[in-house]
Amino acid sequence: MAVTLSDIARYTGNSISSVSAALKNNNSTAKVSPNKREHILAVAKRMGYRPSHAAQVLKNGHTHVLGMVIGEIHTPFYGEMTSLLMEEAEQHGYNIQIYVTNWEHKRANEAIDLLLGGRCDGILYFEGNLNKAPFIIKNNIPTIALSNQIMGLAYIGEDYKSGFLETAEYLVAKGIKNSVFIGDQVTNFSRPKLKAVKEAFAEYGLDLEFTECHNSQELVYNFGLKFKSLDNNPEVILTENDTLATALLKGLFDAGVKVPNEVSVIGYNDTDYSKYCSPSLTTIGFDKQAYVKTAIDLMIKMINKGELLMDEIMFPTFFKKRDSA
């Protein structure tokens, strides 16, 4: 059973108002001496007292919790971003409650329903489409879309093209002309990343083919395994993300293909573990620390102002040269 102020008052022989003052560091009408405060705090700790979160919410109007709806956390990029967002939020006195959807719209909607029940002060949406965006906008609920732009909501994303332009410039300088991009939904050029890589390579006169892998590491591994049997071997293979790139490197290694002597491999996201692949992975990234700081600062600004903002902030991407290219 939870320990109450009355329990502590009875045990210490003080009034409830004196116990409350001690626990609030004398930030109340009643005041207690330093010695009495230390005694009350020691007893409260020994008894296992915990402040009522529900009572604090009713009094302050804030939960100091942010809800985050995210497609996955098991891959390095999303795991890293989740950790960084949690660390940044904690510096501002907020905790993050995470809902993982496995990229299923039903789960995303269920998560939003739970969060809209007053369980958080704002929502970080690291998923795809948001069916409940009109309700969020109408009810002025602080929400930020991360990576996937949603009409009417604040958006923090990546300028994909800047990194692909740097990549294309590098490849041209090396005399490379034909490349393959392996990814998901590669015929959907309304996707910002695909549109950006296609335009960037076209500007530099580079041939770029697209191969569908449905974001499957197994399919990408098999592509690497069969590399030597391809009719027209590309000089460079770009992948949708670093996770796919590592699967590709493994397939190429098992097939006896030397990277980068026979083919170069370029990932995307510049995850921490990409530095420790063999060979270390050339990739495209962005400033994740600045990204998460901007996201949390913007969220707290909305919460404090009590209004929904529609800022659109894009972070430039960059080419990160390592041993695989």
Image (tube, rainbow, N blue to C red):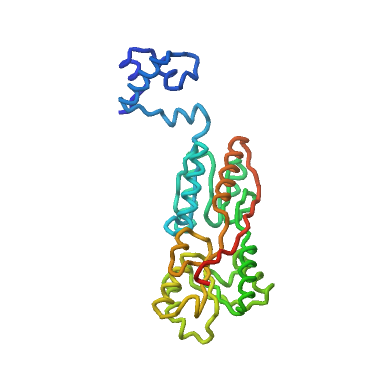
Q: Nearer the viewer, residue 11 or 71?
A: 11
Q: Is residue 203 above or below residue 315?
A: below
Viewer can see residue 16: no
Residue 35 against residue 259 in the figure, above or below: above
Asked where in the image residue 171 lies, by quadrant, the reply is: bottom right
**Nearer to us in this view, 137 or 257:** 257
Q: Identify the residue at image location x=37%, y=22%.
A: 41
Whether 290 is drawn above or below 283: the answer is above
Q: Residue at x 52, y 28 (%)?
A: 60
289 to 65, vertically: above or below: below
How many marks the image carries: the answer is 0
For the residue pair 169 and 155, the one nearer the viewer reads as 169
Relative to 3, is 267 on the left or the right? right
- Relative depth, front residue between 320 and 54: 320
Res. 128 visible in picture: yes
- Is residue 164 rendered to the left or right of residue 253? right
In what quadrant of the picture does the N terminus appear?
top left
Residue 272 picture location, percent across and down = 47, 58
Q: Give left or right: position of 278 versus 116.
A: left
Which residue lies at the image location 53% right of the left edge and 61% below the top edge? 269
Residue 293, image x, y percentages: 56, 46
Q: Quadrant of residue 221?
A: bottom left
Q: Position of residue 184 (x, y in %)?
A: 52, 68
Residue 76, x across and y down, in percent: 45, 58
